[in-house]
Image: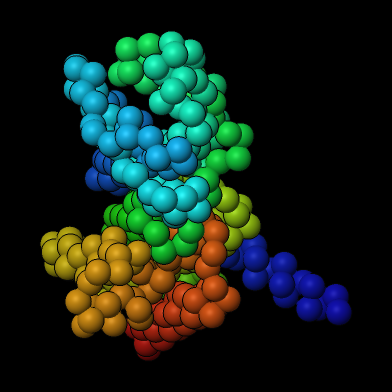
Amino acid sequence: MNSTNTSWTETLYNIWVVGSKDIVDALKPKTTLINIVVVLALLVFFYWILSVRPFDKGVDVVVVPESGSSTFEDDIDLGDGVLIRFFPVSSVEEMRRSMGYSNLGLVVPEGFDAALEAGEQPVLTGYVNWFQRFKISELENQYTEQFSLALGQPVCIAIQGESIIPRTGTLGNEAAVAFHLVFVTFFMVISIVPFLMLDERKTKTMEALLVSPLSVAEIVLGKALAGMFYALVIGAGWFLLNHMYVVNWGMALLAFILIALFSLGISLLMGSLVHDRIKLSLYNLPVTILLIVPAFFAQESNTASGFRAYLEILPTAALSRLMNASLSVGITGIDLLKDLAISLGFTVLIFAAVVWLIRRSDR
């Protein structure tokens, strides 16, 4: 038992030695620092364009006219770029399913038109999406002011405390935010790890590691640890900015770890196969396009059958779906297991290929 514990302790120590060295070495080239700054800038930019959206003053409202009211049939232009667009539905349940990119769900009660004509201040029941739940008071004031201005007399928008949690597979901010994490994590790791391996070949560090008492698996895991450090940096930034979207934290963290591991596997594979900096830079682009760009359409149902079949087995699309599942409810057990199997299966195969390639280069 003691020898087993010692063996594990020594293995973990060896992995830590390789990983900690690579974490520091990765920061030495200026290009790495530039890449980190670029990815962090992309992180903030995507948050700004998806969640803050200061340029979009429009208000999309899904309306349930319980009284048959016709007040909210036509769009209302308040000027200064503020346009209130109405999308009528027949029930609250349909409204919940239709929120998507909309800002507000609104239930028009019985007697609303009569209350307006009598000069009273009617109350409208409002619903907002899950990610807006921390701004209910602010949104109540904003929408009350806008609708009072639109109708020419005071009305009250009372937003329910029960926010609308999106369903898995529906299009909305959540799908884009999930893809955003896949993109920035992959981009961060593939911008650092392969080039670190390239530099180690030039300085003969890799050769020194291969003739050291370290096993190939320890070397690979050490490099994965270094890449994981930078993946965690970008992941922490993503969760800090987008925490309001998360519904299931356990699944969100699991999905992120799988995203990071897959990104590390691809990056280590690229670093093992390509030994020229210019070629590596050139090959990174098509790899990113083939793996990452299609994942943007992971939640899109209106795609060609051939492309849909590709998305079904693409690991990055599976990872995007897993992350989206943590930002929503309703994923089936079969779909969850399928996406987990695809993600884990490809990741294990890629790491096995990396170990084989490095072991082969040692001969």
x, y percent for residue 192? 33, 55
Q: Is residue 15 above or below residue 335?
A: above
Pick out the residue farthest to the right.
1
Q: Nearer the viewer, residue 144 or 197?
A: 144
* 328 or 191, nearer to the observer: 328
For the point 54% across and 64% down, the residue is 330
Q: Residue at x 68, y 68 (%)?
A: 10
The relative height of residue 338 versus residue 29 in the rendered view (above or below) is below
Q: Indicate the quadrant where residue 41 lies.
A: top left
Residue 362 at least partly seen:
no
202 sits left or right of 258 in the view: left
Asked if one can make out residue 32 in the rendered structure from this viewpoint, the answer is yes
**At 24% from the left edge and 26% from the top edge, which residue is drawn?**
76
Q: How many marks?
A: 0
**Would residue 55 appear left or right of 361 to someone viewing this image?**
left
Residue 331 vs residue 200, the one in the foreground: 331
Camera-side residue: 356 or 122?
Answer: 122
Q: Pick the quarter of the image with the C terminus.
A: bottom left
Which quadrant of the view contains residue 42?
A: top left
The residue positioned 41% from the left and 64% from the top of the image is: 169
107 to 318, vertically: above or below: above
Horizontal and vertical percent position of residue 202: 27, 63
| x, y percent for residue 283 | 17, 68
Viewport quadrant of the N terminus: bottom right
